[in-house]
Image (cartoon, rainbow, N blue to C red):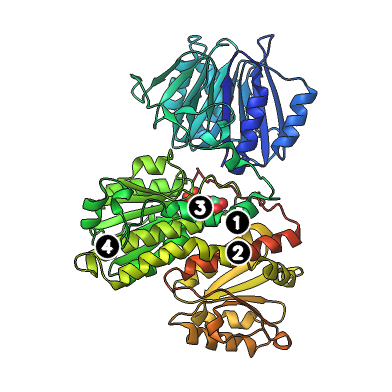
Amino acid sequence: MCGIVGAIANRDITPVLIDGLKRMEYRGYDSAGLAVLNSERQIARERSTGRVASLESLVKESNLSGNIGIAHTRWATHGKPSVDNAHPHISKGSVSVVHNGIIENHEELRRQQLAKGYKFTSETDSEVIVHQIEFHLKDSDNLCEAVQKTVAELEGAYALGVICRNNPNTLVVTRRGAPLVIGFGKDETFIASDMSALISVVREYCVLEEGDIATVRTGKTTIYNEHGTEVERERLTSSLSSDDAELGDYRYFMEKEIHEQTRSITETLEGRIGKDSILELAFGPEARPILNDTQEIKLVACGTSYHAACVARYWFEEFGFKTDVEVASEFRYRTPVVNPKTLFITISQSGETADTLAALQYAKKLGFAHSLCICNVPESSLVRQSDLAIMTHAGPEIGVASTKAFTTQLVALLMLAIALRSRRCAGDGCDQQQLDLVNELRTLPAKIDDALQNEALIEQVAKQFEDKNHALFLGRGAHYPIAMEGALKLKEISYIHAEAYAAGELKHGPLALVDENMPVVVVAPNDTLLEKLKSNIEEVRARGGRMIVFADPASGLKTDEDEGMTVINIAPVNSYIAPIIYTIPLQLLSFHVALIKGTDVDKPRNLAKSVTVE
Ligand code: G6P
């Protein structure tokens, strides 16, 4: 979604704002803008469509500079991507605002403001905010009070950064339903949607809570809670390193993140597996009673994280736990019957996905016993609002198409499933299968490395997609969601229409689509469903379909160019960890197809990394 950054300092802050926007471009990237109070105490602004680099050129050309300013990178919701719709918005030359979120009652406010004579220059829902603040500043010059009065009239979600000509030493920020952090430097203070925007300037920061409003000054920042009481928010030290957000030798972040999976999975496992068991205390001191109390599992997530939930269902069920999986945007509007002994698990890379957060809040109202999140961002709203959080430790993921976040989510979920299993299957908590599972987890990094070695072969195979517009992905069992994830990756970054099917469903419709123009990608590990899957492969072959099969060498499946069948062997793996390993070739395939198609791999059109609005 959109990203906000702001700064107040005794130096020109435009380079910090531009750097922050670049680091947050993954949140949204159809337009960007920046406003500062310049030396004549006027609000000066530049905005442009496209990437932050275009804005940077404009800022250089116009010599924009100032000691206080706000900036924004946008992902359009209300109003097309255009310069007029780009933030910051300004009212009467006096107030300027950047907004992340959605204002649901903007039409009503717009009507009232038009009647008062305000002129609108954009189609956004956000512009009403700046006019409303300007209106409230008529009563007093106190910017914080004017923002407080304004947000009391807003319905929806917002994180705001506000500057005002008559308050040249104060930046006001507030949030509800969208994230915001304040970073503390020496005599300079910064704000941003997330800490990754600020890593080049500060380490110390605090996270604003729902409804907080803060007056940010160079020396002193004052925070008030939603009731207007002055509060302190815990000062934290960011562990992000600026290397994490640099490309190094790679061309794309997605490429870097695919190759980082050996390391990221090692970090997910670190400190969490003992000699023969999962060290569940490493999940937090409350983990044990919560897991002891769990009878059933409900998994809720969006996008790629939802696919991780779909895989995990197979593990939880096999280990004796009734499990239900649902996308967050649907769950939040249903009236499910709740067994109060159900552990409500959310999965999210960012921890800020609006639907997932709303689902968690809804689950609390519905009476689920406990909540647990699997998340990659420790400071996120989801982590703060869940009873228990298992961090994936994947490091910042910048590419919009999720890769290392997904495999580390799977690793965290498998560890959780094994920990729960010990309560159902293993009596005193240790048996041969548990030992085997724990040992398999240890082998994961090396096996990921093996799977990455197939890249050159996959690059060749990717050429088959050069002139294709559609593809089918097939899998069975826990590899059906892996096929779903493979299809999603291809769609997201190469714009090829791709659909995944449980291979047994092929005969109920998709077989009608199979011909030489429809590549069929098959995930064929050596598991109990392999023989069934082979029959499905024959169904495709008999109809002249072109197949790319990722298979265990023991499957007996062989490349047959005359029959249009390419088989890429994946080193043998245990069936529990196979979904994690078979994800790798599918990621590499979509990446190389996207390179051939010439798309913007890290920033696919119309998508955002973190969707903080409904
Ligand atoms: C967006 C991203 C996806 C991601 C989904 C859920 O759609 O583009 O890559 O899977 O949001 O995000 P989350 O941060 O909750 O995992």
Mark 4 residue type: Glu
The CA span between labels 4 and 1 is 35 Å
Q: Which residue is mark 2?
A: 452
Locate the N terminus and report the quarter of the image it occupies: top right
Question: Which numbered mark, 4 or 1, is in the foreground of this view?
Answer: 1
- Crowding at dot 1, Cα within 10 Å, few <14 / some 14-19 / many 20+, comes out as some
Quick one: SS at disc 1? helix
Left of 373 or right of it: where is 488? right
Q: Are marks 4 and 3 in contact (CB under 8 Å)?
A: no
Residue 460, x across and y down, in percent = 73, 70
Mark 2 or mark 3, which is nearer the start of the sequence? 3
Whether residue 121 is visible here, answered yes or no, is no
Which residue appears at 41% of the width and 67% of the height?
440
Q: Are marks 1 and 2 in contact (CB under 8 Å)?
A: yes
Question: Which numbered mark, 4 or 3, is in the foreground of this view?
Answer: 3
Q: Give the numbered dot on residue 259.
A: 1
Left of 327 or right of it: where is 323? left
